[in-house]
Amino acid sequence: MSKSNKKDVGKGIRALLSNIDKKESRKGNTVLKSGQNETPNKLPLAYIEPNPYQPRTEFDTEKLEELIQSISTHGIIQPIAVRKLNSKAYQIISGERRWRAAKHLKLEKVPVHILEADDQAMLEIALLENIQRADLNAIEISISYQRLIDECNLTHEELSERLGKKRSSITNHLRLLKLSPSVQEAVSQDKISMGHAKVLAGIERVEIQTMILGRIMRDGLSVRATEQIVKAATTSKKRNTPSTPSVDANLESVKKKMSELLGTSVQISRNGSGKGYLKIPFSSDSELNDVIEVIMDK
């Protein structure tokens, strides 16, 4: 993730954390305010537990090792934000990597800011911090966006404001969640780019997505080349799609019986509203008279 993106996403976290002097945040009854003392406290590490709303279940081992080394040398510079559950239990709001590093170093106490936050604030901060701090792939970002919308009851516009991103960017990421599992996996593993994924997201049929994905990976297609293939595939599909028959099975049966009765090939055509025509061809006056006699006789 680029530095500019992290800076934009950081606006959302700062906007939430800046409300620690207020009783309510910007949405609903989400509460996020400071404890009595805004100076960092020192808490026993054993009193602190992870955030149950933490969207990441796996943490980059190499980066965690770097953080452990940094804390071993310089200590924890940025206090961990926690909320109080009881006198001996505190839950992490943000800073789980620092907490994990502190556990590895077997520190007895760590600096914390004690805040008051409801479950929605916990989830929102965890997701926003996750987007900002971790090197997420496009699918992981998309999932985090969707969780913010679903679980924090945010509209696309509100999410755009939270993240400091254009609404179109939010929409493009959310479209990736409609991709087939194989395409999503390819994005997650950096086998194809976000640009490729956006192009494939415009295809409804999974089998066509998979077919073009194979070509991208096999031939190293550029995004532009992929767009051309998708356009060709879409045009071909429209060209080869059979038009809706104007005569249904019942009319076909009637047509066959009338043709047999009249001794000539009867044509019947009907549109969706029921309008149409019955055509009885003849090749001579004699044949016409035969048709008329059969009809009149019936």
Image (cartoon, rainbow, N blue to C red):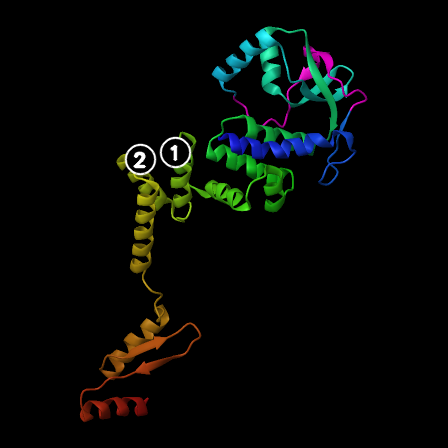
Residue 7 has which mark?
Answer: none
Q: Principal SS element in the magenta part?
A: loop
Q: Is residue 229 above or below residue 246?
A: above
The residue shown at (30%, 59%) is: 239
Residue range highlighted in magenta? 35-58
| Residue 53 on the magenta span | yes
Q: Quadrant of residue 44?
A: top right
Number of other residues with Cα within 10 Å of mark 2, as a class: few under 14, some 14 to 19, many 20 or more = few
* Left/right of residue 204 with respect to residue 12 in the rendered view: left
Q: Residue furthest right?
A: 36
* Left/right of residue 117 with respect to residue 237 in the rendered view: right
| Residue 130 on the magenta span | no
In the picture, which quadrant includes the C terminus?
A: bottom left
* Left/right of residue 137 with respect to residue 85 in the rendered view: left
Q: How many marks?
A: 2
Give amino acid for label 2: Met
Name the residue carrying label 1. Answer: 186
Q: Is residue 246 above or below residue 160?
A: below
Viewer-side residue, 231 vs 273: 231
The residue shown at (76%, 36%) is: 24
* Left/right of residue 7 with respect to residue 210 in the rendered view: right
Residue 217 has which mark?
Answer: 2
Contact? badges 1 and 2 (CB < 8 Å): yes
Give amino acid for label 1: Ala
Number of other residues with Cα within 10 Å of mark 1, as a class: few under 14, some 14 to 19, many 20 or more = some
Q: Secondary structure at mark 2?
A: helix
Q: Tell me where residue 21 appears, x and y as whole percent.
A: 77, 30
Q: Tell me where residue 247 appears, x and y as whole percent.
A: 35, 71
Q: Quadrant of residue 184?
A: top left
